[in-house]
Amino acid sequence: MTVRIFIVDDHELFRSGVRSELGRDLEIVGDAGRVEEAVPAILDRTPDVVLLDVHMPAGGGRAVIEAVRPERPEVKFLALSVSDAAEDVIGIIRAGARGYVTKSISAKELSSAVQRVHDGDAVFSPRLAGFVLDAFGGEAPQPLDPELDLLSKREREVLRYIARGYTYKEVAHELHISVKTVETHVSAVLRKLQLSNRYELTRWAADRRLV
Amino acid sequence: MARTDARERAPRLERSRSERWIGGVAGGIGHHLGVQPNAVRVAFVVLSFAAGFGIVVYVLTWLLAPLEAETDGAQPAMRRIALPTPRRAFGIGFVIAGLLALLWLGGLWFEGNLAWPVVLAAIGFAVLWARGDGRWTLASLGTPLSFTRFAIGAVLILAGMAVFLVGRTSLESVGNVLVGMIVALGGAALLAGPWVWTMGRQLVEERSSRVRSEERAEMAAHLHDSVLQTLALIQRSTSPREMTSLARTQERELRAWLYGRAPELAGVRLRDAVDSMAGRIERQHQVSVEAVVVGDAEMDERLRGLVNACAEAVANAAVHSGSTAISVYVEVETETVTAFVRDQGSGFDPAAVPADRRGIADSIVGRMERHGGTATVHSQPGAGTEVVLKLPRRASS
């Protein structure tokens, strides 16, 4: 069964580019250039995965996630951006996106990232892995909830490999674990990133004008 | 005091280093007016009998005139003259005292009630107008004249006038004079006040609009130098690979600019240094370099070495691996800084590298070792290459 995707991006050129690149492997059920167009269309068509631009007028990708999630919790989001600014990336993940890739990604990689998000896994680009290591780095003064506020040693190792440019498969090979285990670790990190109220994370975010 | 007429032609009034007995004042004035310093010295001595007028002028000039800029030739001369021997000092002292006594006995004494008012007014004038760099302008319009300074200057001038008047007239009329002065000042304020106020406001407005237009010009210049140039290059470029690399470089630069990382500061923090290194190699070799930095540190000589070794590793990957995407990951920990440079290209057998290939040995391994760090290369034919650079935070001496 082909994955049904919906593209939200305010650049017409980018939308048509993605359409032609992904059209072979995936079913594109629609696209939109504005937040207020995108929300009703997504609710109407219920795609499997929404490719979401972080930067858009009227609230950006975050506004779309916040409007759609309560109605259609089964729709998954993959954030796409040219921006490397940490606050954008962490912001969209905390709003509920399952992953983040930069627009310089190749069509093949994008296609497999969509597939991965559809399967319920998280997609970490090297840059996102770097941001997360930064956010959870250092000594936590007093972790309120160790389950959420700290990364395990293994998770940290996995993130380090991803930041170094290793694919999930290569990480699995290096650590002598299965790809499925790598995916489990990454998903756990994503959950922590979304749910943790770790003091360090909030302060780190506030430093970058997030929250 | 303000020799505005002489200022245009004569050299700046500054205290002399070479012609110097005490403070270099006489030498400086002589140089400034084109007169023998000794003549100036005699004038000072004579004026000193005018109720110490000469001494006051000397000290004032000493304080206000800047010291002549140092030149190599003047230095030994200065050292020789600067400190007179005690014997010589006594000699000069006795001669001056003798002259003073002689003049006083001869009745050649300037009238105190003329000298002191002039001195007071002169000091007030100097406080108001002097800028300390030898120029005499009320350019305090540009650099705000401090209230204290203005008050001191005004009080001194008024005191000078008052003393003069007191010396000439009876005490009762001083009150009238003060009233008259206050009335005159009030009138002047009413006359000139609005004009001065408008001037001041115009000045402020002019300055802020100049700042705004400078900012606009700077932005236009930046966009022209960077974005427009790149767009022009992209239009003329033929290979998609080159186009991508140009676009990525521009994207990186523009982002650094927008997020306030000024290019001139690039390299101050490790994060910026790694970013700008990545951008440079993207430009040079038309590859994409994904640089991720976790943690940050102030750049120093050793981190500079690490970044340079890193650059060499990335350039190697760009040239030899055949891969178009290279990952750089730098992690700053409390004890060590570690950098990973990885490509997914052709790879090679590190044991089979010919000895004449100095790139890795000198630029990477050698450089790291010089800074107390290590470099290791992991590679297999067909499985890409990863260079790992480790540097302890503090030099292990």
Image (spheres, rainbow, N blue to C red):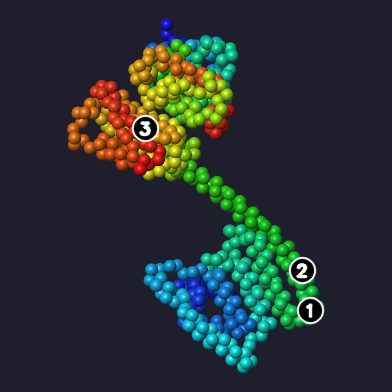
First reached walking from the N terminus: tag 1 or tag 2: 1
Mark number, residue B183: 2
Looking at the picture, which amino acid does disc 2 mark? Val
- Element at label 1: helix
- Quadrant in which the C terminus of chain A is drawn: top right
First reached walking from the N terminus: tag 2 or tag 3: 2
Nearest to viewer (mark 1 / mark 2): 1
Q: Can residue B162 be seen in this snapshot?
A: yes
Does B280 appear above or below B59? above
Left or right, B210 with reference to A16: right
Coordinates of residue A81 in the picture (x, y in percent): 46, 25
- Identity of the residue drawn at 45% across and 11% down: A119
Mark number, residue B138: none
- Quadrant in which the N terminus of chain A is drawn: top left
Labels 1 and 3 within one chain: yes
- Element at label 3: strand
- Identity of the residue drawn at 55% across and 30% down: A141
First reached walking from the N terminus: tag 1 or tag 3: 1
Q: Which residue is mark 3?
A: B339
- Spatial separation of the CA atoms under disc 1 and disc 2: 19 Å
